[in-house]
Image: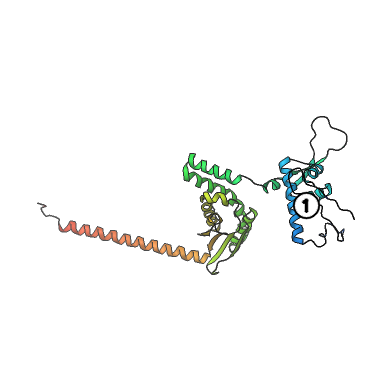
Amino acid sequence: MTYRTVGRTGRGLPGSEELRNNGVVKNVGEARETPTGAPQEEFATGERSTRNRVARSILDHGPSTVADLAGRLGLTQAAVRRHLDALVADDVVQPREQRVYGARTRGRPAKVFALTDCGRDAFDQSYDKLAADALRWIAEHAGGDEAVVAFARARIAAQAEAYRAAMEQVPPEQRTEALAKALSADGYAATARSAPLPQAGEQLCQHHCPVAHVAEQFPQLCEAETEIFSQLLGTHVQRLATIAHGDGVCTTFIPKASHSAKAAQSAKALRTAAEVSRTAATKKTSKTTHNTSASTAGRNPA
């Protein structure tokens, strides 16, 4: 059995050896055994590391052929193709025909591999900084805090149309679950569960927040989201925790309809009692004034 050894690359990367397969190779679909004696975790880590190098090389140099990548990374073309197949399956890179400028030569153009949008998103981006800068500019030049609040409400209202459509298709007792599924489709990894006291209500938990870094600077985004949850569910809700403020999960408490109704009735009763008290006080004051006026009628003020 022959082994291939590859020396150090020209970019200062450490030399890498092609994995020596001393074990039995089973040619069954995509199944491949790891080299005899190599721990599975170590093998998987090495595979991921090499794939990251392949993707990074495409990012740094643009669409590349198998030969280009093999030369830059110090790998065999067979190894590069294997890693590219995995990256294509993960939607990190995609194959395309190489663009030819000037007169075309005979034969088919070489195939090159380019990063997909998903692949680019795996590398450092400045979207959070851009969004925060935009909101800061709005606050400073287009109406202050009120303008940021208006933007936050308009943004979540546009998203809420899809949430509302999903919730209208289920009975009221399943609307929190429907909202969680709709939020998950937008990347919030949301779940619905009973509150610690199940008879009190439910908790909507968002295990991920795509705008957490921006919301940390502009809590208006969280506040507008809480408002829209209340509107969609038709009840007062209470935000208990947010990822933007350092909590592990965004948690929103949603009271059961009966508890919400009782709370509303209590509030109404308090308002009614206050109004009655104010009315009685007003009548008492009016009566006192009237009596005072009557007792002094006809007297000479001098």
Determine which quarter of the picture holds residue 46.
Answer: bottom right
The N terminus appears in which quarter of the rendering?
Answer: bottom right
Query: Under tag 1, what secondary structure?
Result: helix
Q: Residues within 10 Å of mark 1 (few under 14, many from 20)?
A: some
Q: Position of residue 240 (x, y in %)?
A: 52, 60
Amino acid carrying label 1: it is Ala
| Residue 85 in picture, x, y percent from top left | 80, 50
- Residue 83 vertical placement versus 272 (above, below): above
Total count of labels: 1
208 versus 54 height, above or below: below
Q: Residue furthest top?
A: 102
**Relative side of 301 to 113, left or right:** left
Question: Which picture quadrant has residue 117?
Answer: top right
Q: 249 or 70, which is in the foreground?
A: 70
The answer to whether one can see residue 283 in this image is yes
Q: Nearer the viewer, residue 146 or 15?
A: 15
Q: Residue at x 49, y 64 (%)?
A: 261
Q: Give the residue furthest to the right.
A: 1
Q: Where does the image place residue 218, in percent across and percent down from the top left?
A: 52, 49
Q: Which residue is mark 1?
A: 86
Inspect this view and state whether residue 115 appears: no
Residue at image position (25%, 59%) is 285
Q: Quadrant of residue 108?
A: top right
Relative depth, front residue between 187 and 129 = 129
Coloring applied to the structure: rainbow
Residue in the image at 43% along x and 62% along y: 267
